[in-house]
Structure formats: structure tokens, C-alpha cells
Amino acid sequence: MNSVPFIDVLFFQRGHAGVITLNRPQSLNALTGPMVLAISDQLKIWADDPAVRVIILTGAGERGLCAGGDIRALCNSGKAGDGQAESFWRNEYALNDAIAHYPKPYVALMDGLVMGGGIGLSAHARHRIVTERSKLAMPEVGIGFLPDVGGTWLLSHAPGETGTFLGLTGTTFAGADALYAGFADVLIPSEHLEALIEKLAAVNEGEDVAAILKGAAIQSEPSFLALQRADIDRVFQGDSAEAMIAAANALGTDWSKTIAKTLLERSPTSVKVTLAALRRARKLPSLKACLEMELRAGLHILRGHDFYEGVRAQIIDKDRNPKWQPATLAEIDAATVNAHFDPV
């Protein structure tokens, strides 16, 4: 077993498997700039190493794979105007695209909590595994941002309006929902993951990794998204956030009333920009094109108010009482939304 020393992310070879372990369990393996660069470099090395036949992504600790990017650091960089946030996103998005096109089987173990940047490292992989413990989310609207790391690509290709629902509300979803929405491929019990890693480490040249995973998979529980699909489509159709809130209130169920309340609590700018991004993503030809769009929108958001206020309210002060500017959806016109997609 050969290991490469790097404290926040570990790389080692286990049989014929190159294993990446995100190693910041105290912060739920949140991604930093050096981690992104280290993973990118190691993947390039393993791509040319004939002894490595499969890549496995996992996270240290019991809580989950990855909670996303290091939001505090991005917030501080944006305030300082030092360009580090932009560099981080450019490198992270390049890694997301590289994972999607990696020449060898890349297996992501999405056990436990997987959010934001963690989804970027896993949901674009060739082989995506969830477990009964999986909890996924693209919660960026809650901090005044938008779904990134290719999230607009994934969400815009989910069935019906389920991706619109997940992106605009930041709702956490389970493994069965990840399968339904196209974020994952198979569900395997978490207690069987170690045995699965052993099998993958012993994979033969040219052996079908998908068949190995399918052999270990079990039937998932019914998906909430599938069961709620008709109401989700009814509420989240169209291109108007205000109309979605009206439709949710008109539906009159406990679920729909909660949705209306949630949309009104999110950053109005983020809600409108996210909705526009999701609709644009449906017409874009590739993950890379979506990542480029997300970068433009993210850099515009970094010049505004709500991202810093959202991080303050949710992560720094934790008063959960952000003061958005503008404070209402009605104050944000189409020109303001569209400007977020202009070159920076």
C-alpha cells in the first residue's frame, strides 16, 4: 500500500484501486483550494499509471463524504477582493469536468452527508453509489448563492421539475431520491462498502465495474420525489418564482405551504438567479458550458450583498435571520437577473 502524504486529503493505492479520502472530518471534509489542486494532480498521475484500474472517492469520519466548499474562506476572499475565491472556483470546476470525463472507472461512495462541492466530486462520476445513510443537498440559495459545481447541469436534467424544486429550496434528499433524480446509480448498504472496496481493489483489467456494483446493490425505498412528482411539477413549472409561490399556496397542502414559506425565506436574488440558471442550463450542450455559466453568475454574486449576509447568518453568527438586499422578489427585475450571466 503506497500513500502520498497530504494532511487534508489522503491518496493511496489499494491493490489496483487508487483511493482518495477527504480527510477533514472535523469540518465534514469541506474542500479547500489545496485539496482541489492535490486531487486534480493525483488523478492525472493515476490516469497514466497502468497499475491503477479504478478510482475510489471516500470521506473520513462517520458523518459523510463532504459538506461542500470551505464557505468561510470563500467569503473572506470575496470581502478582501484577493481573487482567491475565483481561483478556487476555476480550479474546482475544472476538476468537476475532469471527473466527468475521467478515462478510468471513478467510483464515488456518497455515504452520509454530501452537499455542494461534495456533489461536484461525486455526482459527475461514472459510478455513483448512495447508501441508506445518504443525505444530499444543493443548499446554496440558503446562503445567497446558486447551485454550482455543475449543479445546474444535474438539476436541469432531473425528471420534470424535481431539479427546480431541489435547487430553489435547497431541500435535503435521500439515496432513493438521488437515484430518481439522476445523481446516483446504485444503492448499496453502508455496511457493505468495505467489502466492495476490496472487490474493486482486486478488479481485473477490463472487468466491468458497473457489474460489480450492480451485484452489490439492493432495491431502494420509494423516492419522495417520485411520490410527490405531480405536485412538484404543478408548483415549479414556468419561469416565474412569484408564480411558483402562488401555485404552492393555491395547492393548499402542508407540503406546498411549506414550500411557499421556504421560497420567501431564501435570498430573493438567489432564487431568481438560480431559476434563470436552471432554465438556461436546459439549453446548454454540456456540463462544461454549465460550469462556465455558474462561474459568471457566482462572480457577479460575489460583488453583491446577499452571499456575505447569508454566510454571516447561517455559518458565522448562526442567527438564521439574514437581511437580504433587495428584500423581496418584486424588487428584482429581469435585467438585474440577466446581468448575472454577462461576462465578468
Image (cartoon, helix red, strand yellow):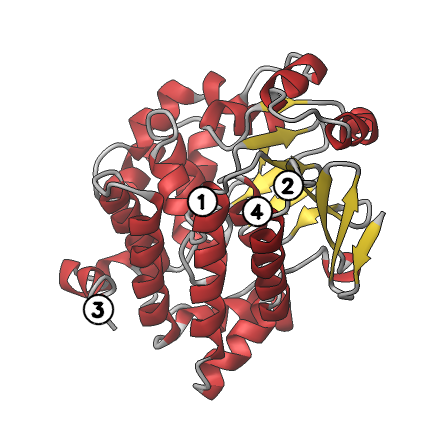
Residue type (three-letter) at the residue carrying disc 1 = Thr
183 lies left or right of 25:
left
Query: Disc 3 versus disc 2: distance between alpha carbons?
Result: 41 Å
Q: Whole-percent x and y of residue 110? A: 65, 37
Do labels 1 and 2 touch, CB within 8 Å? Answer: no
Q: Which residue is mark 1?
A: 169
Q: Earlier in the sequence, mark 1 or mark 3?
A: 1
- Nearest to the eye among marks 1 and 2: give it: 2
Element carrying mark 1: helix
Query: Disc 4 versus disc 2: distance between alpha carbons?
Result: 8 Å
Q: Residues within 10 Å of mark 3 (few under 14, many from 20)?
A: few
124 lies left or right of 303:
right
Q: Which residue is mark 2?
A: 50
Q: Whole-percent x and y of residue 164? A: 36, 38
Element carrying mark 4: helix
Q: On the image, which quarter does residue 239 sit in? A: top left
Do labels 4 and 2 touch, CB within 8 Å? Answer: no
User: Against 284, is 24 above or below?
Assistant: below
The label number, if any, that marks residue 343 in the structure image: 3
Q: Which residue is mark 4?
A: 47
Q: Earlier in the sequence, mark 3 or mark 4?
A: 4
Q: Earlier in the sequence, mark 3 or mark 2?
A: 2
Element carrying mark 2: loop
